Image: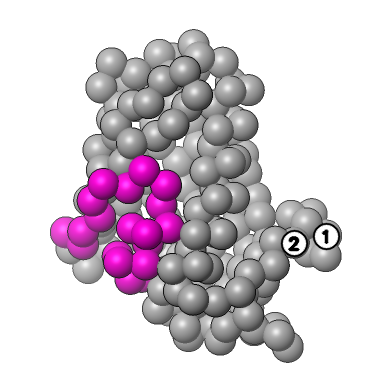
Amino acid sequence: MQFQGRYLFLAGRARVWAALNDTAVLAQAIPGCQSLDWSSETTLDLVLKVDLGIAHPTFSGELSLTDVDPAVEYVLHGKGKGGILGLAEGAARISLQDHERGTLMHMQAEGKASSALMSLGASLIGSAAQKVIDRFFERFAEAMDAQIEVLDPETGQ
């Protein structure tokens, strides 16, 4: 499954970057987040409860940052275990650009899940994941006390 989004934050790039690396801001923004803590300079431990409609698994896992170019971009890799529902994993490239009204963020992500999760139906998982991503960026903007405009992922308009 692939996802993408473009978001305009009415805040400076340094402020958006700092918020992307602040566990308190991220924990407020991640729906169902039960804990989020740095375990190393580039790794976070995460526990979250996911609402998949008919199931509500709790995932524990790890997030790691690679290809870090401070205040410009990074790739966030995540892998989690959801008990009997198995594994979910994904990666997202987050990039920031200055914009005359603030900071333009582009996100490209892909994820996959084990056969147990996929038995719920790819469209259900995809729909739930896209909702989680969309809600994450809304909550992220709220947590960092900034306004956000969701742009068309293809055109950026």
Dot 2, crowdedness within 10 Å: few (<14), some or many (≥20)?
some
Q: Check contact, mark 1 vs mark 2: CB within 8 A.
A: yes
Looking at the rendered structure, the kind of residue marked 1 is Thr
Q: Is residue 4 above or below residue 143?
A: above
Asked if residue 6 can be seen in this view, the reply is: yes
Residue plotted at (66% across, 55% down): 5
Say the numbered circle drawn on residue 155: 1
Q: Is residue 75 magenta?
A: no
* Mark 1, secondary structure of its residue: loop
Q: Nearer the viewer, mark 1 or mark 2?
A: 2
* Quarter of the image with the C terminus in it: bottom right
Residue numbers of the magenta segment = 21-39
Q: Which mark is residue 6?
A: none
Q: Secondary structure at mark 2?
A: strand
- Tell me which amino acid carries mark 2: Leu
- The residue wearing badge 2 is 151
- Please give the name of the residue rendered at 57% of the width and 83% of the height, measured from the top-left corner: 11
Residue 78 position within the rendered picture, expressed as x and y whole percent measured from the top left = 37, 45
Q: Position of residue 147 (x, y in %)?
A: 61, 74
Could you tell me which residue is drawn at 25 percent across and 55 percent down? 36
Q: Quadrant of residue 66?
A: bottom left
